[in-house]
Image (tube, grey):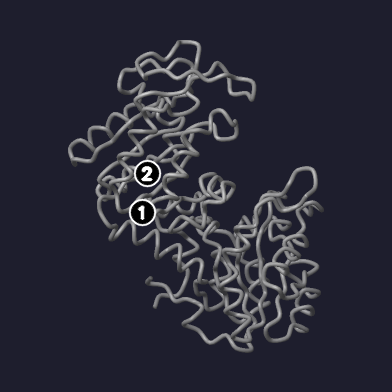
Amino acid sequence: MAKKTVRDIEVEGKRVLVRVDFNVPLDINTGAISDDSRIRAVLPTIRYLVGHKAKVILCSHLGRPEGKVVEALRMAPVAQRLSQLINLPVATATDCIGAEVEKEIEELKQGEILLLENLRFHPEEEANNPTFAQALANLADIYVDDAFGTAHRAHASTVGVAKYLPAVAGLLMEKELTTLGGILDSPEHPFVALLGGAKVSDKIGLMQNILDKVDKLLVGGGMAATFLKAQGYSVGSSLIETDKQDLARELVDAASRRNVSLLLPLDVVVADGITKEATGQIVAISDIPENKGIVDIGPRTIEMFTEQIKSCQTIFWNGPMGVYEIEQFAVGTKAMAELLASLKATTVVGGGSTAEIVEEMHLANKMSHVSTGGGASLKFLEGKTLPGVAVLLDK
């Protein structure tokens, strides 16, 4: 961990602005928080600051209000949930910048917590507007970034603020960088990456960067169709990225040259539509009907992936194996989640939908690490510099 953390800086009596990722999913009908894992993930940092008598000012975005005030996306329900989880009062500010907020912060005592209003109610946040960043910085003496999930975005609250305040990592940010950095730099071998999801294009950078580091690469999900098509198989009505077939072929060849086992499904579940009423049919990859598309990996593939994964010491998983939202096409994904949860190996789950799946299945606590950043974890594992990390002070 090359960056300074909240432990490396004096916080007592200081106003500490903490960028958190409280962009939690909300129930469409009730507006209630349906998954609070992102709030729970930053509790260690908040507890540390409260315990060290800092004045804690939290800031986050929620949803996509697109620079306007949207009543349904106010931060009050998040403050309420945080208060329940941390067992302390959490006040909410009227806005995230301005004289009124400055007055609310002036009244803040050591060890007290204030959550600012949704940052994205201001278009200047996503535009990384320097005036807005300075207005945020005016509220505090120190900046702590604990929002790994937004570290790949150069916004005012993730990058801009660091120009005006000493900037350090929070404890969650430290954990993310240490764990993900660890599987890139010094994984225990054999090391396998299990990749799924809809598109090859989302994972190409990751695959290219980890090819030198893994012993095995297992490809499932919708993206397997592009690989199968590139290998000369007919994939029926499956969605494929025609412009990525050459790249898929190149990846297979590159893996072969490096003695990396790149394994594609042996059988798949196909259906004539992606609906709750659709019925799946298990077929070998050589027998995919013209009028049907791939919706999950088949039982032989589950068996093969299981055997391959069981023999490994480090497993990184990102992307579902099928259409997880539809019960009958979630079998492969659930099998992989249950398998990883049962292993004694180091199991690292990439953020986004994969993290949501293991949370929903109540298996997150059985994994070594579940990342809170979907796009951020992919960018980091692609070997890219994350803007929100680059601006933090070096040790």
* Residue type, mark 2 in image: Gly
Say which quadrant the N terminus sits in.
Answer: bottom left
Q: CA distance from mark 1 to mark 2?
A: 8 Å
- The residue labelled by disc 1 is 383
Question: Residue 92, located in which quarter of the rendered image?
Answer: bottom right
The residue carrying pointer 1 sits among few (fewer than 14), some (14 to 19) or many (20 or more) residues within 10 Å by Cα, namely some
The answer to whether marks 1 and 2 mark residues whose Cβ atoms lie closer than 8 Å is yes
Residue that numbered label 2 is attached to: 205
Tell me which amino acid carries mark 1: Gly
Between discs 1 and 2, the one toward the N terminus: 2
Instruction: Judge whether 261 appears above or below 163 on screen.
Output: above
Q: Going 28% across and 46% down the picture, which residue do you hit?
A: 311
**Label 2: few (<14), some or many (≥20) within 10 Å?**
some
Q: Is residue 354 left or right of residue 60?
A: left
Front one among 6 and 315 = 315
Q: Exactly how many numbered labels are in the figure?
A: 2
The furthest residue to the front: 342
Tag on residue 3? none
Residue 123 placement (x, y as % from top left): 69, 55
